[in-house]
Image (cartoon, coloured by chain):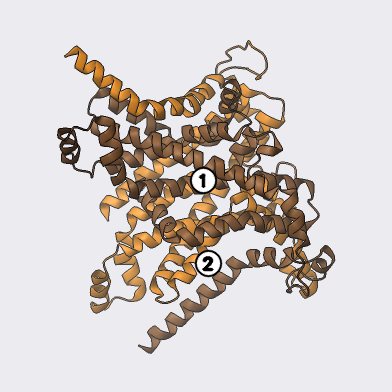
Chain colours: A orange, B brown
Amino acid sequence: MPVKSYKKYISLFTFIGPAFILYAIFLLIPTLGGMYYSFTDWNGLNRDYDFIGLGNFIEALKEDPDFVSSIFFTLKYVLFMVVLQNVFALLLAVFIESRKRTKGFFRTIFFMPNMISTIISAFMWTFVFAQVIPQIAEKTAISFLDQAWIGDPKVSFFSILTVSLWNGVGYMMIIYLAGLQGVPQSLKEAAVIDGASAFQTFRNVTLPMITHAITICFFLTLNGAFKVFEVVYGLTGGGPGRSTQVITMNIYEEAFSNNFRYGYASAKSVILFVIILIFTLIQIQVMKKKELEA
Amino acid sequence: MNQKKSSSIIITVMLSIGAAISFFPIYLAIINSFKTQGQMFESFVSLPTSISFDNYVNAFKQINLLNSTLNSVVISVLGIGGIVFCASLAGYKLSRTSGKVSSIIFFLFIASMLVPFHSIMIPLTRMAKALHVQGTTYGLAIIYIGLGVNMAVFLYHGFVKSIPRELEEAAQIDGCNEYQTFFRIIFPLLVPITVTIAILDFLWIWNDFLLPLLMLTDVENYTLILSTNTLFGEYNKEWSLILAALVLTAIPVVIIYSFFQKFIMHGIAEGAIKG
């Protein structure tokens, strides 16, 4: 018996070992390490550091207005993104699904931006916002277009949203399309025979059938939106000043281009993780309930 | 019936307008990349009067296209290959073993799926430096394996449940050992989920920006995305050059997309629903 269980562990190790070791080195230990350092005043260079308890967290939330405003900016962005990305994606999916011959064409066109790297998308749109639109505004004298699309933080928030949506809607659209394809045609036909309008059919037949897809897309958009980095980095660089800085960027700046306060930056990372965790758990709870009702 | 037809036309018109808006930035990037700087500033929207490939030749050199693409390919292939190899073994074994040890390990894999990359980037950078995997394409690929296996283990774990155990028992009776059983019998059956995983990981690794930015220091090792980023920083007024570089960067993805369109769509939907 002991020989057999010894063998069992050997086989368990050879199968799971490679994945687990790499996972532990590059994900598990850094996660735990970051949490550990968040309670210290480590600066990344010195060998010794002290435990300062919650000092970093208190400083980040109380004495760091840039960080706090980056949290609020991110929250605002998340709110807009979660709503708009899902609304656009679902609308596109419903419309495209109703097409027959042009389905493939539209799906490709709307999905294409998603294949382009986010940072490349941001550069492409920088050209549009900084060069093309001002030129069009000048030639056509449409005053609405004549704005500092990247320079004015109030306007650039919407520029950032535009690029994020352009880049991200396609992915969610694909998931919704897959969900819609799972809705049995017979159910929709039955509703139509019973005299339901197109909107009623959608509201009462289609929507309840795709709640699972909706839950997934909300989860993905919520998670993705909190982690936004590339779009802002490429488009405004967080500026002017720090007016469009998001949480991830604030952490990046603190850790890699400021004064290397690793302990402090780690505390901010933990705050980001906790925020995402809370929002995700709430979202999953709420959606699961809805799914059961449906 | 007539009403139905007209609403159908309205939807087509709306989709077409949306498609035009969606395609507009790509159109602008393409047409302006063929213009000279002077032609461009006359009008961004109009088609080029004469086509010049100077920007492309220049951008080709500046982003060191062949080398950068090769780096991206090496990192993606090694990363995906490693993830598939490690995760299929682990996902299979975890799915087939009951007991505390195996469920704890599985829980550890899943628990980390919510950790945002930005929360680990600082310690990860330290770790990479300490292990001397920072600064090389191979090292970066190994890091991708470490970061990517949890999701893949999760997907394999779920998929293996649908494979009947009798297959393994039959193979064992025929004299296969555990490893032979896995590689000859099980792994071929995992192809559908492997394709899904490979696609999701390809989209992630090929387009990733921040991790290569932190890990690669030598221009020789830059990925396609990083090289374009550098170009953007250095020549931020020479738009015709930058646009040519952006188009060049996008071409490989478009080619891959046109070949694997069905798989990509399927992979995204599958990955999302299982996840």
> Residue at the location (29% across, 31% down)?
B179
> Residue at the location (34% across, 68% down)?
A202
- Amino acid type at circle 1 is Trp
Tell me, yes or no, if residue B232 can be seen here: no
Label 2 Cα neighbours within 10 Å, binned few <14 / some 14-19 / many ≥20: some
Determine the image quadrant of residue B38. bottom right
Quarter of the image with the N terminus of chain B is bottom left
Quickly name the residue at label 1: B204
Residue B48: % across, % down: 75, 72
Pinpoint the chain carrying mark 2: A
Q: How far apart, in angstroms, are the residues tagged by discs 1 and 2? A: 20 Å
- B272 horizontally vs A42: left or right: left
* Disc ID at residue A109: 2
Question: Closest to the observer: A136 or B212?
Answer: B212
Residue B23: % across, % down: 60, 67
Label 1 Cα neighbours within 10 Å, binned few <14 / some 14-19 / many ≥20: some
Residue A200: % across, % down: 33, 71
- Amino acid type at circle 2 is Ile
Residue B45: % across, % down: 73, 71
Q: Secondary structure at mark 2?
A: helix
Question: Closest to the observer: A258 or B221?
Answer: B221
**Residue at the right extreme?**
B38
- B3 horizontally vs B233: left or right: left
Determine the image quadrant of residue B197. top left
